[in-house]
Amino acid sequence: MYYIGVDLGGTNIAIGIVDEKYKIIRKGSVPTRPERGVDAILDDMAALSYRLLGETGLTLDDISWIGVAAPGTANRDTGVLEYANNIPFLNYPLSERMSSLMGGKTVYIENDANAAAKAEAIAGVGAGYPYFIMITLGTGLGGGIIINGQVYSGFNFAGGELGHMVIEEGGRPCTCGRHGCWEAYSSATGLSKITTDHIVKAREEGTPTIMEDMIGGDLSRVSARTAFTAMKNGDRVGQEVVDEYIKYLASGIVNIINIFQPNVLAIGGGICNEGDYLLKPLFDRIWKETYTKEGTPRTEVTIAKLGNDAGIIGAAVLGL
Ligand SMILES: [Zn+2]
């Protein structure tokens, strides 16, 4: 049997047909274009699913179920997408609508960060462990808590928002309305903001930094890579940015480890491409600060391995 996994994002709808070994045998994507409304988006999700079935020579009879991962609050019990970021879903009966377009197949829904975590827990670096947590460092900071293969998200499906714990009271403003959330520091967006602040400060103090040349003096060209690249070239300001970023990232990870003590904590997102430049100082800080002492088995902190496919695979395994 096979599963259909739908990764519904604000920009693209990515869909894959996944086999029982959790391999994507065929995938495709179409633009979401959220402004055209939810029904048109659902029609495209169904049309692409049928196209992929046709291309693989499969029919709906070969499909066990369909899973949909969406940004926002997804009620697993009712199949209602209660709210979504950047897509105009509000209390939308997504499972029911998609099922009616797909020959009555069962349709599961889940928050996208939770689905990505479930993918890694079942088919990635968390496979075989009962307690698994994943954080994804992207535009925001997504979190997923998996216990015995199942998503933990509280009684109302809105839990597991690890990025919205405050690590700096009264700190940077967050998209959620609070100040000092972990996401505002440790997401890719947060890293860009820390970088921008340090460049501005260097200007004021007359401290030279190669980051000025890298961005051509234009602060809007700062990215999550700017400071790491500068640091690798021996830039002192770049090094300060990376140190500060790792301090906040480690602080949040240590909080999570101290609360949950998962077998494995996986980190996903483009920043992981920095490899040991990120991980070595991060691990040094984490093990200095965690509550567990010598001799106690420690959480394995590692890089997630499914990359961009985690959304599709996570959606596909929602019925497990
Ligand atoms: Zn927040």
Image (cartoon, helix red, strand yellow):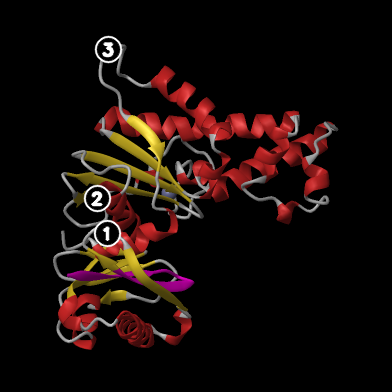
Element assignment for label 2? helix
Q: Which residue is mark 2?
A: 122
Q: Which residue is mark 3?
A: 295
Mark 1 residue type? Tyr
Q: Quadrant of the C terminus?
A: bottom left
Residue at image coords 53%, 26%: 281
Q: As displayed, is residue 182 above or below residue 3?
A: above
> Residue pushed farthest front?
57
**Which residues make up the magenta segment?**
1-17
Which of the 4 quarters of the picture holds residue 257?
top left
Provide residue 255's location: percent of width, then percent of height: 35, 31
> Residue pushed farthest top?
294
Provide residue 195's location: percent of width, then percent of height: 66, 42
Mark 3 crowd level (few <14, some 14–19, many ≥20, 10 Å Cα):
few
The reply to whether the magenta stretch includes residue 73 is no
Provide residue 179's location: percent of width, then percent of height: 48, 44
Mark 3 residue type? Gly
Q: As displayed, is residue 83 above or below residue 204?
A: below
